[in-house]
Image (tube, coloured by chain):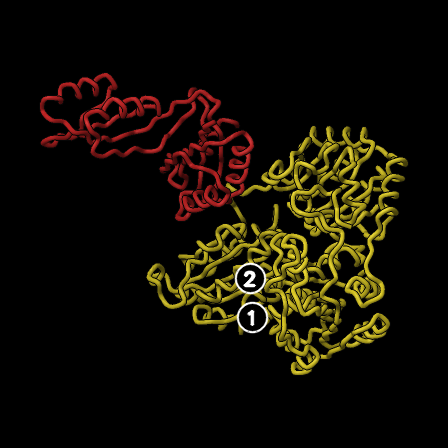
Amino acid sequence: MKHTLAVLVENRPGVLTRIAGLFARRGYNIESLAVGETEDPTVSRMTIVVEGDEKVIEQVTKQLHKLVDVIKLSDISNEENVDRELILIKVNAEPQVRAEIMQIVDIFRARIVDIGRNTLIIEATGDSGKIKAIETSLKPFGIRELVRTGKIAMVRGPKVKNGKNNKSLSF
Amino acid sequence: MEITGAECLIKSLEQEDVSVIFGYPGGAVVPIYDALLNSSIKHVLVRQEQAAVHAANGYARTTGKVGVCMATSGPGATNLVTGIATAYMDSIPIVIITGQVSTQMVGTDAFQEVDITGITMPITKYNYLVKDVKDVPRVIKEAFHIASTGRPGPVLIDIPKNISDSKTKCKPHEKVDLRGYKPNYVGHPSQIKNASMMINSSVRPVILAGGGVINAGASEYVQKLAYRIQAPVVTTLMGIGSFPTDDELSLGMLGMHGTPAANQAVTNADLLVALGVRFDDRATGAVEKFAPGAKIIHIDIDPAEIGKNVRADLPIVGDVKLVLEELLKRVEEAKHAQWLEQVKQYRQATPLKYPKEQLTPQYVLQVMSELAGSEAIITTDVGQHQMWAALYCKFTRPNKFISSGGLGTMGYGFPASIGAQLGCRDKLVIAVTGDGSFQMHMAEMGTAMENNLPIKIILFNNSCLGLVKQLQYFYCDKRYNAIDFRCNPDFMQFARCYGAEGYRITSTDEVEPVLKEAFGSGKLTIIECLVSPDNLVYPMVLNTKGLAEMEL
């Protein structure tokens, strides 16, 4: 099963290496990893998607927790959450198929962000399922280039996972 | 007033109560060595950097303080790696200081530059590359805190040369505040209550004590628990000394070369109280056959150890000592007469045995252990002699058996004994070693002589790599390869050329008089015992076998 981990880490050089190195040397697979600064500039938040059974996930979370630079960690897979990925697709778009492509873009509530002579760049956001679907739909036209971010996720409702806010909530 | 980064480093080390640094100088640490001249901290110059880490390790394990070692950038730093990994695997608190090329040169493949923080990331508890001289006091403070608290381990600090040279006010750093590092010491009360209920209802309990007991200083509590519930105690290699081996309830070490009684007791137990252990494969044998009938209570300070190798029916995360203290409030007295009778039978039916008609390490170690007494510190290298020391020496107190358990580092024993003797000048320190292991660091004779360390080196010379030979005996159908040392030095002459003493033992009747004489002298001594290359360590649990399926 795929698990989504929300990991708060110190925002300093080398932390990503520590996390990635841990996964590599203990033989865990990272499906995707997205990282960026949070509302507190000293803290970064990583969203890590990792594949494995319960035992593997337990070890992953415990080993991550042991890292001095990991401040807080939660497995949000079983909580209601909003998760998003962003994808940029450069697709072949001869003038005669452009209308068709634009229809697809509309259906997925995606956007065209660049027009070349025979190409379009399409930007889409959504959960993994939607991202996959738009990719499949555009494939027949010929995908020239594709880039996607890892998944980022946030638990629904008033609950927060970022350390500082969490503390103030519990007081 | 401003001082240099190097002076600030030394000052910060003094504030951490460091009294000795094991090290080896070089270009990138020249400023630090210069600052060291004005300090009360003693520097011990080793002959190769790896020996400095092992010495710091031996020092830490016998004094209870954090061991400190230092080396220069590049090859100095990479030579430390095996020693750091050794300390990491055995959870030994040491702080390692390495020099680095100046910050503006970092990343340019400069002379003697290696990325030592990158290299040691998987084998340190934490590491630092200091990029601002103002950070020096904080980094030192944090490093000692991280190394010595929670599950202890090595912490490395890499200091570029220009940082050592630049000026700073060096304001002492008082408080450690690491929001990502909060070790949990106190066990969960309801888990402790559940554990006590499991213990109270057990019929065939066994206590398994590991290195965590020694790190936590919990030996006394393990004894209390064992006496209270009348449970036999087995230890891991790292746990040797956590429970007196001459006690009636002691069954000795378990595992691949464990005692038959320990292995059988664990296999037949209905409850295993595992304290400060990590269920290493050498301790468990085939995991699926490990303690098949037992419920397992696993108490450890490191949550990641729980459920890693062996299922735990009841985990308690916390300091072994604090948890046992709480647990003892709830555990009832028990007799377990029937179980103890059964355990006694295991012991009687399968005692440890070895050939009596020739000079053997087993015999020498037994005599040595008697003569040395309970206060002596015994370090070992890695190989057959290590297993025999674990099986045949008596240990009644913790922090006396000093051996490389997790990594199995040949060459560990002698440098570790240097650290131990430096930390414990008044104690008898014995380094038990073999001709293979000793030759890995025998240049440290010079270090020991320079510092007037009267270490007794018991060197079992069988002119081969006995434990590897043993593996080839069992797994390669006696097709021996690359195990013979056809040109060993004359170790007596070797001792003499350093001005040390040397004794050679060739027969059983020489053992006692020679050891007595050697232990009485105040000089560094090699006691070489010429032993057979055909002696094997028994019992042995072969690959894929369970603990009870021993070759005896």
What is chain B's hue in the picture? yellow
Give the percent coordinates (x, y) of residue B489. 64, 77
Q: Residue B39 carries which label?
A: 1
Q: Relative to B38, does residue B261 appear above or below in the rendering? A: above
Confirm whether residue A67 shows in the render. yes
The amino acid at mark 2 is Leu
Residue located at (37% from left, 68% from top): B111
- Chain bearing tag 1 is B
- B363 relative to A141 in the view: left or right: right
Q: Earlier in the sequence, mark 1 or mark 2?
A: 2
Label 1, label 2: how far apart the Cα atoms are: 10 Å
Query: Quick one: label 1, few (<14), some, or many (20+) residues within 10 Å?
Result: some
- In the picture, one chain is red; tell me its letter: A
Q: Observer-nearest residue: B468 or B421? A: B468
Q: In this view, does A155 lie to the left or right of A56?
A: left
- The residue marked by circle 2 belongs to what chain? B
Residue that badge 2 annotates:
B13
Considering only vertical position in the picture, is A48 above or below B109?
above
> Which residue type does callout 1 highlight?
Ser
